[in-house]
Image (cartoon, rainbow, N blue to C red):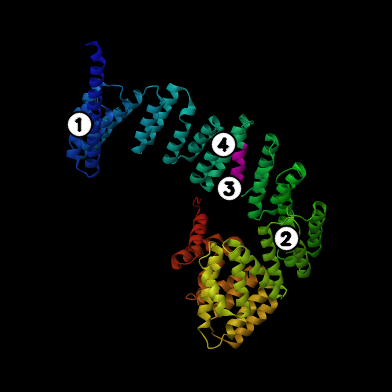
Amino acid sequence: MKRYFPLLLLLLLGTVSRSQQTNNNANNANVRLANQYYINGEYEKAAILYDKLYTQNNRQEYYLSKYVDCLLALEAYDKAETSIQSHLAKYPESSTLYVTYGKLLERQGRQDEADAQYQQAIDHLPADRFQVIQLANLFMAQANYDLAEKTYEKGLKILKDKADFSYYMAEMYRRKGDQPKMIHYYLESLDEVPARLQQTKSLFQRFLYEDDLAELQSQLYERLQSNPDALQYNDLLSWVFVQQKAYDRALRQEMALDRRLGENGMRVFNLGEIALNAHDFPTAINAYKYILNDKGPTCPFYMESKRKSLIAKREELAEGGSFNPDELKELETEFETFIQEVGTNAQTALIVMDLAKLEAFYLKDLKKAITILEDLKSTPGVNDFLLAQIKLQLADYYLMDGNIWDATLLYSQVDKAFKEEEIGEEARFKNARLSYFAGDFEWAQKQFDILKASTSKLIANDALDLSIFIMDNLGLDTTARPLKMYADAELLAFQNRDQEAEVKLDSLQQQYPDHGLDDDVLYLKAGLAEKDRDFQTAANLYEEIVTQHADEIRADNALFKLASLYEYELVDLEKAKSLYEKLFIEFSNSTFAVDARKRYRILRGDQVQ
């Protein structure tokens, strides 16, 4: 008999196990069916199953809660109250069930009794973090934020650990609309867990409006006074300054953090990039100067800081619209001196390319710019991609200088070497544009049609515009002469021969009055006025296109340009906002509609990611 006992025991255990598995399967099936009945609004059927599940599962409160929800939907209030009271008689510490009872009483208009049950829920809270959060969430689900606040206050009192609830309390105050307290508790959470810094920035980016930044700044100053070593607050203060576009103040914070933490200058470099993109050139220059002087040549950002410093100085000079020759020559000397010190090589190639741009566009010395790039092209160690960039820039300068053959040769070389890449598509687009300038419109249009599928949004949009433009204007006349005159004017503008371009456009208007190119002529003239920083004239011309040529293909382009002028140059933000709104409403299919909606929302004060 003894030898059969182990076998018998295994058989019994297997039977029990199979029985439990069968019960579990049946239980799961009933849960799914009850939930489905509930979702479908079949509350009577759902109530029967939840009642059964409550009995079979050791009177689990979840099933009772769902059962009561069904009875509430059926308005079977007496039955629901009896069930809750029966459970509370056995389990008086069940704090969440008091909330269910309160909901039942509130549904019947018994508000005072409901409030008493809600207070009972808080009074019966155990010293358990999970249950505190669970109860607070129940109150928040009812939008009863005052009771959620009392719940957390009770939790803080019985657990004596603010880190347990600060993050959740911040969320509660956010939903309640109490921004100062939301900020306070997010900072409390950050105080306890500094690693939450990036997460906290993201939350503030989503939930703070411009008016709230002053409150955040004030709270940060208070915390730094009491805890000056909490570097996460310095970092966050810098972030606030960036949001306020006070880049110089942000820079002071970033430099202080870089020194205190013994970092490699990355945060200062990044701030310089932000300032440069925002056209705050003095702050950008100071950021790069810090890296050049304090970090030195061993810093990984040294070379790029030198390059960006020179770019910032160049753009600062250009910002006023008129270039002081002496200052430009000083900048040219600074470029050349630095290149002589470090040598011309693959590492300094981008700086050399920037010097060529200075010569071509600012000092108006195309020959020197071309010579610089021809020498750079043959520099040892330059990789294929960088060589392609040099060739594209050099080809542009050849085209500006009237050397069409060398320009198209270089464009073609880049196209062939990078056929499947974006830089190859850029070369293809420029070659097609060159054919357009030369008057070979049909071939150019075929190339633009292909480039409409470019992976680059910019190239695709430009190709689409030019394809439609050629197609529309070739069909207007028996001669292509007006289109050729316009293409000639565009080439002259590209070559910085702006006065000659104006003369060509005037001639086109005189010879072909009331032509379909009228809006295009106005558009190109507006672009020339912008280039000359005559922003009011440009705005008037764009306005004329929008009002007099609203059905032409340049209308949406002109409207976006006009809105941008009012936003950035003429600084009439209400006017800009109304123009962006007009664009995305009246030109909803425009390629500018998405950007216009985004700019409109930013000007309205929305938080846009």
Q: Is residue 112 visible?
A: no
Q: Is residue 342 above or below residue 504?
A: above
Mark 1 against mark 3, which lies toward the viewer? 1
What amino acid type is highlighted by mark number 2?
A: Met
Check disc 2: other Cα within 10 Å, few if <14, some if 14-19, many if 20+: some
- Between the C-alphas of marks 2 and 1, the distance is 78 Å
Q: Which residues are magenta?
A: 234-242
| Residue that label 4 marks | 219
Mark 3 against mark 4, which lies toward the viewer? 3
Residue 152: give x, y in percent of width and height: 42, 29
Check disc 1: other Cα within 10 Å, few if <14, some if 14-19, many if 20+: some
| Residue that label 3 marks | 243
Mark 2 against mark 1, which lies toward the viewer? 2
Check disc 4: other Cα within 10 Å, few if <14, some if 14-19, many if 20+: some
In depth, the one of 372 and 205 nearer the eye is: 372
The quadrant in which the N terminus is found is top left
In depth, the one of 119 and 460 nearer the eye is: 460
Q: Which circle marks residue 353 in the picture?
A: 2
Q: Secondary structure at mark 4?
A: helix
Disc with the residue nearer the chain's start (1 vs 4): 1
Q: Are marks 2 and 1 in contact (CB under 8 Å)?
A: no
Q: What residue is drawn where x is 82% and y is 52%? A: 341
Q: Secondary structure at mark 2?
A: helix
Helix, strand or loop for the magenta stretch, by majority: helix
Disc with the residue nearer the chain's start (2 vs 1): 1
| Residue that label 1 marks | 51
What amino acid type is highlighted by mark number 3?
A: Gln
- Between the C-alphas of marks 2 and 4, the distance is 47 Å
- Between the C-alphas of marks 3 and 2, the distance is 33 Å
Mark 2 against mark 4, which lies toward the viewer? 2
Mark 3 against mark 2, which lies toward the viewer? 2
Residue 519: give x, y in percent of width and height: 55, 77
